Amino acid sequence: MVKNLLIKGNLKMGSEVFLFNLPPIKTCTPTKWCLEGDNGKPVCYALKGNFVFENVKRGAMERFEASKRSDFVESMCVEIEKVHPKYFRFHASGDFYSEEYVGKVMKIASQFPDTFFRTTTRRRDLKDAILELANLPNFIVRESLDTCRTTPGMGLPFAALDFLDVVNNKDSYLCPNDCPSCGYHCWENRKNMHFEQH
Ligand code: SF4
């Protein structure tokens, strides 16, 4: 049984944010950039830093198992109801892993019309289900772009590295990595966004 289904956002996100994370690799479709970057080391932040601590990896695996259970939607709704988050992020690590799971996320978000949900994805193979989810008025889904996948292909706004051509060619918002001072822009605006590679 998972100890904490939800994770409280860190200081940079502010107290109104909660998250639900899944294990990377197992649930996403990593590109060569995610795994090896320019120098053979992972660039994806979900493969380094705090995310590689054993307790964090174990928590993500437990959430993955919980998400496959038939009572997942109900359990999540109970937990979200307790904290009434204004902003909720699915998958700071991990991604959608099946159509059934996308459907569960859709049911959860539909129960909380006053909460802003957002996520990013690389799962082009689940495009149809994800586009349906992205039609919810309170759920923004962006496609992650990097040096291996430089242009959007899902009909979604993008989240991209700042030096990609697509950022210069389209209207895009730079993430300042401080949500309260940014005004939670990317949760509330269905726009392209870009970020600096650290
Ligand atoms: S764009 Fe703003 S709200 Fe979104 S992650 Fe960056 S700092 Fe936070």
Image: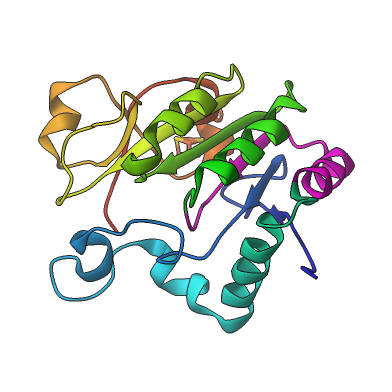
Image coordinates of residue 130 in percent, x first then y, are: 46, 32
Q: Nearer the viewer, residue 115 or 68?
A: 68
Q: Is residue 150 above or below residue 1?
A: above
Q: Nearer the viewer, residue 116 or 66?
A: 66
Extreme-bottom residue of the structure:
54
Asked if residue 92 lies in the magenta stretch, the reply is: yes
Apparent side of residue 43 relative to residue 134 in the rendered image (left or right): left
Total number of numbered discs in the rendering: 0
Write the residue at 19% across / 63% down: 32
> Tell me, what colour scheme is on the image?
rainbow
In the image, the segment drawn in magenta is: 73-94
Apparent side of residue 47 relative to residue 138 in the rendered image (left or right): left
Point out the image quarter for the N terminus: bottom right
Q: Is residue 166 above or below residue 83?
A: above
Write the residue at 14% across / 27% down: 168
Quarter of the image for residue 149 reads top left
Image coordinates of residue 135 in percent, x first then y, are: 52, 18
Write the residue at 56% across / 75% down: 57
Q: Is residue 9 above or below residue 173?
A: below
Apparent side of residue 15 relative to residue 25 in the rendered image (left or right): right
Point out the image quarter for the C terminus: bottom left
Q: Nearer the viewer, residue 122 or 7?
A: 122
